[in-house]
Image: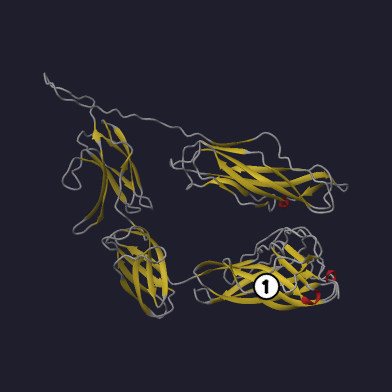
Amino acid sequence: MRSKNRVVALLAGASMLATTAVVLGAGTASAATPSGGCWVYSPPAGAGIEDTNPASNTSSSLAPWADEAAAPTGPADYTLTSSGATTVGGTRNFSLTFNKGPKNGGPPASGTAYYYFSVNGVNLPAVQKAFSAPGGATIPGDTITGSFTITSAGATTVKLRKVIYDIPTFLTRVNCNGQTVGVANGVNPATTPVDTNITASFTAVGPTATVTAISNQVVTNAARKNDVISFDVTNFAGAGTGTAELCNSSGSSCDAGSSSVTIAANGTGSGTLAVSAAPTTGSRALKVTSGGETSLTPITVLGDVTVQTNVTGGGAGTTVTVTGTNWDPNQAVTVGGYKNGPPFPPPASSDATVSTTADSAGNISAQFVVNDAATAFIGASRVHAAGPPPVALFGSQAFTFSGDTCTAKQGAATTGSCALLETVDLTVVAGDLKMAKAAGNVQLSGIALNGTEQTSTGSLQDVTVKDYRGGTLGWSLVGRFSGLNGPAKPSGGNFTIAPSALTWTPTCAPQANSDDTVVAGAAGAFTNATTDLPLCSVATSGVGADGTSGGDAIADAGLALKVGPSQAAGTYTGLLTLTLS
């Protein structure tokens, strides 16, 4: 029997710099070298092609996807493109072209190559194709094609996951993928495959309803009861009569009431839908169905308007902050003082009104000054529909007016009381966002060279992020690694260790004075000296129960540095820069 060690003896090499080829539509693609590398091994007898438990390893370290010195000279160049249908239900084609494969270091070898792809993370069946490599030469380049059915609308990415070359004659397989670590009897492309960076992207479209207008609104994404929604539809499969209704975001739990829309042979049409008098409010969807196809267009159904005030009483000159929700987006709202009613809304006091405009989400905010002793409510209003009869939106909060004097008892009266209100004002000044680290340098464990790749470990000196701004701003802490410089080379310069050799695993912990949600960054390697990796962060949506971000958080990270078997001995130093923003 011929020894498996004579076949496809890939040259050991360092991890390759990952680049990305992103293809839009069927346009021209840029060739790229796949991330990771290749691994040669023998599978167990009868093992499936994707089995991740090699019986034995030929490789001892990661090898590149192709020999750069072999013709055509230069690294492996892979180009992935897609073409064909762009609508849901259609067939999309893809094509992978590459200039050369791994090097065969032994006698002529042949077998089957298995090319694995995914679409938006869903794996496709492998594309199989026979290959043959001359002795001592690279596997020739090729073009691999396939297709899939588009199942959903939106951004769609086809990705090359991996390539497995199977050579049954020599009981050998070569697994090439995005795994950047290669250790015999440990983590390597055969035992722990990682998808490559080779991708092609396009946007898939499905049946679509576009809101063109909403009565009484100046936006097309929010409506309230009795408003009428006008819409156009496109990309339906063909002629038919569609049904429009308001439902939840998944298309179920629909409100009572619907309308019909006629769809032409080219899949287009237009229609209207009246919002019911008692709709479900909040995040909803305009659902249009026809011939088994469905489109869902997000829309907000506004509920009753609200008004809140920061104080409930005060004397003449009291400034009141008025806020509210569910107002007609991007439209004017009048804030004013009101006396005790009826009618509804109650009669206005003599306080000067203030005009404000609701934001795109229907929120209002205004400052209003109370001077009229008759002011019993502070409210906001607008005419939503001109009518007849007109439809008014109104919300208010009670306000107790206090003068500067009052009489508790008149003359010889033995009963009676009165009260005065004093408004207490406080200004809270925002502090700073800052950080501090524990003193000293990061100390990695020493390495004694022994002819194998080894890992030096350590951890950051703890960093405390201090957010004393009292806002809802959030923050982000990232790290960047320069790599390490070591002893001088006889030929000039220094021996180095690349940034990509360092992997960190962040940890983050809010302290007792913080109830924010502090999120740790993902574990990973530093790609190069100019790329930031997230360490810790607080999102603007991650503030605590008090409604503001603030307090301390401690950031740390475990460090693991890969040191090659032939790394020059000596002392190495580099910088890990942490940036807070």
Give the residue furthest to the left: 412
Farthest residue toward the front? 45
Q: Is residue 393 left or right of residue 296?
A: left
In this figure, which residue is indicated by the disc labeled 1? 115
Q: Is residue 307 left or right of residue 148?
A: left
Circle 1 packing at 10 Å, graded few (<14), some (14-19), many (20+), is many
Q: Quadrant of the N terminus?
A: bottom right
- Quarter holding the C terminus? top right
Query: What's the residue at 84%, 51% (across, down)?
Result: 450
The kind of residue tagged 1 is Tyr
Q: Judge left or right: residue 359 versus residue 139.
A: left
Q: Give the colour scheme of this rendering.
A: secondary structure
- At horizontal 19% and vertical 48% (from top left) the residue drawn is 344
Quick check: can you spot residue 132?
no
In the displayed structure, 556 sits above or below 131; it is above
Above or below — where is 485 with respect to 19? above
Residue 267 drawn at (x, y percent): 41, 77
> Quick check: can you spot residue 405?
yes
Instruction: Please tell me whether residue 416 is drawn above or below residue 117 in the rendered image.
Output: above
